[in-house]
Image (tube, helix red, strand yellow):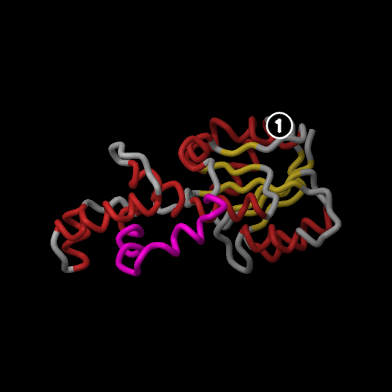
Amino acid sequence: MAKILISDDHPFILMGTKVYLEQRGHHVCEVCSNGINAYNLILHHNPDIALLDMSMPGMNGLEVLEKLQTATVRTKVIVLTMHKELTIFNKAKALNVKGYVLKEFSTDVLEDCVNAVLSGSTWFSKELTESLEHDLPNNESDVLHKLSFAEKRILELVAQQHSTKEIANMLFISEKTVENHRSNIIKKLGLPPEKNALLKWAIRYLGQA
């Protein structure tokens, strides 16, 4: 049986998660809806696991994780969130998060995540890891530095899954110009000449899916 703290600013999710965990034999020592309260309660209770929402008043989940880096607690953090952005996911991993669960799938996988974290493993939603499991390349800054301002802007729009026609309309340029920029970006990034290679790279590394 694990000692668990839950923090979420959505009352139905908060209480639903509490019931879910208690039905599976865990002890929920505290619930709250504010990141500052969550941090202080973690320090007070030193639970096995803190289950944190990403978006909360006071402090968000990442801010709580960051403050816990210098705290002398044994608590392992699981983030329960709707955020699928790669940048947020990678920041959480960099801050030593042990679990990352998407709320839309939580009723199916939360128990697996808790059990994995309790056993000393990490557990991240496969819906994220299947497409976003890789960090940015080590030479990312060098690679992106090769791109012009216009190319960087187009790459951002590609990451947001806009079509060539949509990008042309948004930037007030021709579709041919967009295609030329895309070709140049592909060459500069050293991507293989396969369909959607640029789109896959942009979604994976810029996290705008």
Q: Which residues are magenta?
A: 136-156
The residue shown at (70%, 48%) is: 77
Amino acid under label 1?
Answer: Asn
Where in the figure is residue 30, as x and y percent of width and height?
A: 74, 51
Depicted 181 relative to depicted 13: above or below: below
The residue shown at (76%, 59%) is: 69
Where in the figure is residue 117, as x and y percent of width and height?
A: 72, 37
Q: State the residue in front, 207 or 143.
A: 143
Q: Residue furthest right?
A: 72
Would residue 20 be counted in the magenta stretch?
no
Q: Quadrant of residue 39?
A: bottom right
Say which residue label 1 marks.
Answer: 115
Q: Is residue 31 left or right of residue 143?
A: right
Predominant secondary structure in magenta? helix
Mark 1: secondary structure: helix
Q: Is residue 29 left or right of residue 122?
A: right
The residue shown at (60%, 49%) is: 14
